[in-house]
Image: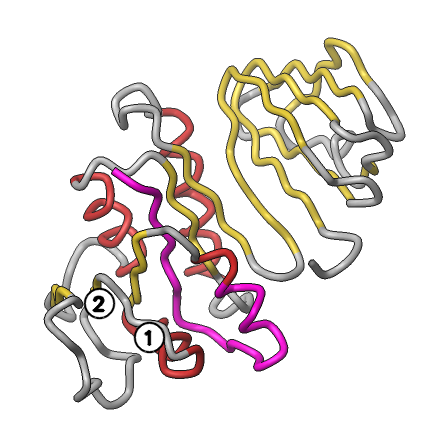
Amino acid sequence: MRNAILFLHGTYAAADLNYYKKLARGKYLVAVDGGYSFFRKSGLTPDLLIGDFDSIGRMPRTLTARTAVVQHPAYKDKTDAELAVDHCLSLGVQEIIIVQPSFGEPDQFVGNLMLLIRAAQLRRRMQGCSVHVVNRRYQVCALADGAGMISRGRGDIFSVVPISDQIILTLSGTEYDVTNLVIQRGESRGLRNRIIANPAHIRIRGTALVIRQFAHKT
């Protein structure tokens, strides 16, 4: 199954639409409730419209048969974002990109980060699917006992935030390379590094949020 991209409720600036349209190419397109505003502005058609529809405003009248609509009750145990992630996992996607164009409500933002942590910790049970939160300014993912490579990131600010009691961090291609650095949860030593090489590499034992702030808009 192809990769999925979820557009959440938020402010989609006109200057950012082309960036998000490029990011959406070739992916299963999901409008999460008020995230349908992206599709109104961009002219793209979602494959799925999902949520309790409390923030969508007026329901679109021009949906075609291509768009599946899944409505959930307003009183429920999961957020619209989590329900959308679960729906995509049921389709067998290999990667989920969650577009959160603006910070929005702090509880919703933190809740979305927790989705990344759950995904990283349960990756084997999720058939290896990876989940990211992105917008024009930054990208956030969670890494649990794994390694990764960052391409075309020179100049970007790079931060690692421990979620487990401690992590053991190895970085190369950054301003401050480290090997088997132990960072306890609550310590800030993993923050505000800078990528200086292409590619850069990271390896983590434990679970952490990995935050990449883009130096330049792409």
Q: Is 199 located above or below residue 133 in the figure? A: above
- The residue positioned farthest toward the top in the image shown: 180
Question: Seen in the image, is 150 located left or right of residue 8?
Answer: right
Question: Looking at the image, which is closer to me, 18 or 195?
Answer: 18
Query: What residue is shown at x 69% (from left), y 58% (from top)?
Result: 218
Q: Please identify the quarter of the rendering in which residue 208 is found.
A: top right
Point out residue 57 in the picture as x, y percentages from the top left corner.
Answer: 28, 87
Q: Please identify the quarter of the rendering in which residue 197 is found.
A: top right
Whole-angstrom CA distance, mark 1 to mark 2, is 7 Å
Point out residue 56 in the picture as x, y percentages from the top left corner.
Answer: 28, 81
Residue 4 is a magenta residue: yes
Query: What residue is shown at x 38% (from left), y 53% (from top)?
Result: 5
Q: Is 6 located above or below residue 18 in the figure? A: above
Type of amino acid at the residue the image marks with label 2: Leu
Type of amino acid at the residue the image marks with label 1: Tyr
Q: Are marks 1 and 2 in contact (CB under 8 Å)?
A: yes
Magenta residues (range): 1-21
Question: Sequence-wise, which precedes: disc 1 or disc 2?
Answer: 1
Point out residue 71 in the picture as x, y percentages from the top left corner.
Answer: 12, 68
